[in-house]
Amino acid sequence: MNRFAARWFLLLFPSFFAASAWAQTSAARVEETAEHSAGKTAAIAPLPQQLFGSITLATRSEETRKFLELAINKYEDAMYDDAVVRARHAAEKDPQSALAYAMLSFSARRTLPDLSALAKAKSLLPHATPDEQLLARWMTSIQDRDLLPAIVNMNELLKRYPRDKHVLYLTGEWLFLQQDEDHARALMETALQIDANFPAVLNRLGYLYVQMGEPGKAIASLKHYAEVEPSSPNPQDSLGEVSRISGDDQASLLHYSAALRIDPTYSPSQVGLGDTRTLMGDFNAARQEYDRAIKMADNPRDELYAKLQKTLIYFWEGQPEQGRKAFAALAEEAAAKKEPNVRFEIAIARAMLAANPQEELDQLGRLSVFLAQPLAGMSEADRGVARATVLRERARVSAFNHLADNAVEAISELEGLATTSRDPVVENAYESARGFLLFTQDELNSAKDELAADPQSPLALQQLAIAEEKLGLAPAAEATRTRLKYQRGPTVEWFLATHLDPGAAH
């Protein structure tokens, strides 16, 4: 996590590490007292429900509580569509449940954001119990533009429930997505101490470990996950992806195929087969795998994403002009289908693979206009990250093409976005954008520090390693290149980092 963001987490986060079980014990006493008092009127009204026997809910509906627990379980198992269905059932059983709508919006953000559910959850918060409000507020605030309330609610949740494995997982997963690997790992490993067979944690730790350069631990964690959940395709899918990241493509193919034997409709593994074959250079087979994924898709987002990955093959096989023509057609299709998330992914890929720097800057400018206002189907947090990605790329391309004023302007916009959002992913982009410019100005020590703040960007890591080598920091450069090694994937950034001269203009 970068220094810009660290102050927001360090201001609050240590409360988790200092907390002991007294917080949860104290909460239990309060709940027991409430239950004792309520017992006198049990014949008149049912008792409030408790989520996983822990967090007291305002709802009296046992069905709502059960659907909420199912929704959380499905979410933890990375079955986001199923989580949405269960959360919607919970809301139908009790339309006044703030947490039901919060969980609905929280799950939907991973597929197709549900802004009406988000608004409904916020409107119902006053009717929730205090701890239910904490969880619901955290779930809703992570989808807003300003993430400081999310951080505050997260830390209060961890203080109140330091030994609740579901709270530990949900908050740890969010920190992982916010690129705060150290804190995410601490929460996940704490949850694993509580339940050594917790599937969601075993899965997420696999990704954490490989990103942190520990592929052996990653594979071991995911194999344990597969033993715990042998009938689910997701463990095999995760093993397929992490094996590919680790450089074992044959194992990747075997695991993806195993996932599809468990569930022949599991589209992530079908796309994964195409991704791995692309990196293997088996382009004809990759196209066939993507075609199967396109036919399998049951929504525009999955269909367009598979088409995006298929289009990228032209660049991997050295046919950029055909790729740019295909991108132009795909961009029109995405615009017609009004799916903003993949539309952005297609547009940023198309821009970064443009024929020359000026064309790329022109496309980035149009993409900035597209992202300037809220978009139906895209959360404000996601829109902020998308805007930051565009600005970082604009700063990088401008810096390496002697357009310092343009780079400074992009960095200034990024600084404003980082300040208002308090989003670590945005702040990482801001720092690495500064790093690219400082590198071109031969301020290598400062560039090194800034580029190191964005460890999820292959282009930033590549530039960091070059800066460290120029400074004579051979061990540090080797460590950075090891980190870069475990970013391996069929992405535009990985393609650029592995196919283009990092000192070149574009």
Image: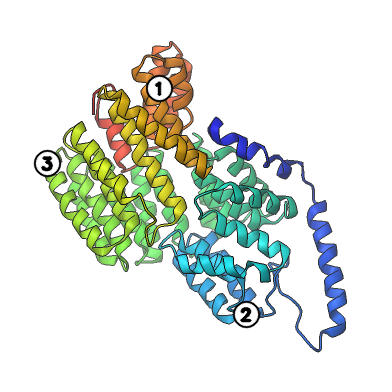
Which label belongs to residue 63? 2
Q: Where does label 3 land, which residue?
A: 321
Image height check: is 267 above or below 492?
below
- Regarding residue 192, the answer to whether it shows in the image is no
From this view, report whether residue 155 is shown above or below residue 50: above
- Mark 3 neighbour density, 10 Å: few (under 14) some (14–19) many (20 or more): some
Is disc 1 surrounded by few (<14), some (14 to 19) or many (20+) residues within 10 Å? many
How many angstroms separate mark 1 from mark 2 (CA)? 55 Å
Q: Residue at x 18, y 37 (%)?
A: 359
- CA gap, disc 2 to disc 3? 56 Å
Residue 450, percent from left and from top: 46, 26
Between disc 1 and disc 2, whose residue precedes?
Answer: 2
Residue type, numbered disc 2: Glu
User: Mark 3: which amino acid?
Assistant: Glu
Placement of 210 over or under 290, stated as above or below: above
Residue nearer the viewer, 320 or 202: 320
Q: Is residue 221 left or right of residue 379?
A: right
Name the disc covering residue 89, or none: none
Looking at the image, residue 275 lies above or below residue 8: below
Screen quadrant of the C terminus: top left
The residue type indicated by label 1 comes to: Ala
Residue at horizontal 54 percent and vertical 80 percent from the top: 92
- Is 371 placed left or right of 26 in the picture? left
Query: Picture coordinates of residue 236 (x, y %)?
Result: 44, 55
Distance between the Cα atoms at labels 1 and 3? 31 Å
Q: Which residue carries the number 1 mark? A: 465
User: Which of these two is toward me, 65 or 60?
Assistant: 60
Q: Earlier in the sequence, mark 2 or mark 3?
A: 2
Residue 375 location, x and y as percent?
A: 37, 58
Q: Nearer the viewer, residue 159 or 211?
A: 159
In the structure shown, which secondary structural element does the residue marked by tag 3 occupy? helix
Q: Is residue 335 visible?
A: yes
